Image (cartoon, helix red, strand yellow):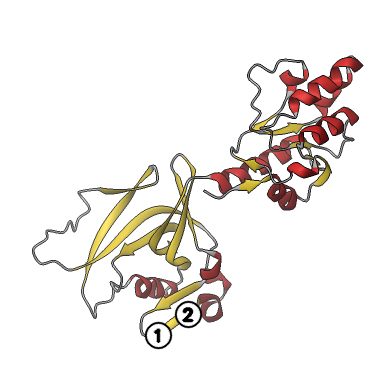
Amino acid sequence: MIQVTSKDVMEKFNLNLVSGNEGIGRYITTSDISRPGLEMAGYFTHYPANRVQLIGRTELSFFDMLPSNLKYERMLKLCSQDTPAIIISRGMEVLEELIQASNENSVPVLTTSMKTTRFSSRLTNFLESKLAPSAAMHGVLVDVYGIGVLIIGKSGVGKSETALELIKKGHRLVADDCVEIRQEAEDLIVGSPPPLLEHLLEIRGIGIIDIITLFGASAVRPKKRITLIVELENWDPEKVYDRLGLDEEKMKIIDTEITKLTIPVQPGRNV
């Protein structure tokens, strides 16, 4: 799993750091976001301190109604040792009590000009993508007629050669050799290439091919949902292969089962 800090969020969304500078490196461990409305009212029994706290116009308007002697106390509780960051939306002015409390407990306070709901949606999507369970697999991921097909098999069986033939017919390459896989939802498995291997394809005996240079930008995709797994294996004359697709085979990736097909191959044959 990739680690995400408050600084990563600040740089991603061009947020302004107001106070709590020492805590800008705090780790964010969940994609859930909290709107601390009940906490403003003084109810901290089930306060989700490990979440990013997003304060909008509603929360601030209620805070303005509090007596002066309670404002700093509430903000001090809001800035707990586990709070990764507090973000003020709509470009609203940061309260003096919040600045003091955040500096005392080193909780970064950030501001954005975006509306609360829109920013909440974008931040949630970003965190879910970064914090999703992940794995790496040896194979080739291609987009075939809009379907993400992960081609796996032993080294030298012809995975990259098969992908090249598909690309020549108008299909698109996502990743070759190493496929980084993330489970972005319960049944959503997404594959992408490592940064160093983007749009590159290695063919044995030829070398590394830059797909964009040869076929153009339309021949690659940055990521794709994996819907089907195809395993290429050397032909075994003693094994019975299902030619009609009557027996459905599954393969589990992280926590999701994906349909798998096994195709026998022989040297010199074009799949």
Which quadrant, please, contains the C terminus? bottom left
- State the mark number for residue 209: 2
Residue at the extreme left of the image, as rendered: 238
The image quarter in which residue 103 lies: top right
Q: Is mark 1 on a helix, strand or loop?
A: loop
Q: Residue shown at 61%/44% (left/top)?
A: 127
Q: Callout 2: 10 Å neighbours few (<14), some, many (20+)?
A: some
Q: Please state the horizontal and vertical placement of residue 199, each as a whole percent of the image.
A: 52, 71
**Residue at the disc numbered 1:** 206
Instruction: Report the front residue among 170 and 206.
Output: 206
Looking at the image, residue 78 sits to the left or right of residue 206; the answer is right
Residue ranking furthest to the bottom = 206
CB atoms at circles 2 and 1 under 8 Å apart?
yes
Q: Is residue 66 visible?
A: no
Q: Which of 256 and 5 is in front in this view?
A: 5
Residue 193 visible from this viewpoint: yes
- Give how far across and how far down residue 205 sits, in percent: 36, 85
Name above or below for residue 239 compared with residue 212: above
Residue type for callout 1: Ile
Secondary structure type for disc 2: strand
Question: Residue at the spot x=39%, y=71% of the render?
Answer: 163
Query: Is residue 10 left or right of 72 when viewed as pictured?
Result: left
